[in-house]
Amino acid sequence: MAFTGDEGEIIYQSTAVPMTRAYRDEKGTTFKGQFFGKNKLKEVLDDAGSEYVGIRIYNALDESGNTCFVITAVKADENDLYENKLLANGPSCPPCCAPDSPLNE
């Protein structure tokens, strides 16, 4: 199967809130997510050139053992562009959470 760039599903708050809550309840973790700035995302995608059709987000642990994500551009043939720039270590939630977001309640 080749990727087309249309993978994924657009969802809304009514679906997302129970999903994020279920993850936290199941895992028993305080980690809720990470923020990544648009300029850094653009830098990763620009570095991939015209080869990428999307991104892949890997669950990871940083050097201190904290949960984090690693983001890579991905080609249509489903291969990661891991030799290009990758993105990681965005500010974690908590403490950098959106105060009024139902996604982190």
Image (spheres, grey):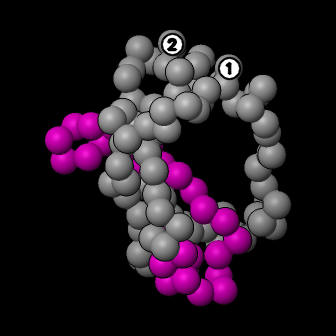
Mark 2, secondary structure of its residue: helix
Question: Which circle marks residue 25 in the picture?
Answer: 2
> In the displayed structure, does residue 69 sit left or right of residue 78?
left
Residue 45 location, quadrant: bottom right
| Distance from Cα at disc 2 to Cα at disc 1 | 10 Å
Q: Residues within 10 Å of mark 2 (few under 14, many from 20)?
A: few
User: Does the residue at mark 2 contact the one at mark 1 (Cβ under 8 Å)?
Assistant: no
Residue situated in front as seen by the camera: 75 or 6: 6
| Residue 4 percent coordinates (x, y) | 81, 67
Question: Which circle marks residue 18 in the picture?
Answer: 1
| Residue 39 percent coordinates (x, y) | 49, 73
| Residue 98 percent coordinates (x, y) | 49, 38
> Which residue is depicted at the point 66% across and 86% down?
50
Residue situated in front as seen by the camera: 51 or 66: 66
Quadrant housing the N terminus: bottom right
Residue at the far bottom in the pictured view: 49
Reply above or below: 66 against 82.
above
Task: Kindly identify the amino acid type of the residue bearing the numbered disc 1.
Answer: Pro
Q: In the rendered image, is residue 79 in sight? A: no
Look at the image and give the residue range highlighted in magenta.
Answer: 41-69
Residue situated in front as seen by the camera: 46 or 12: 12
Reply above or below: 70 against 19.
below
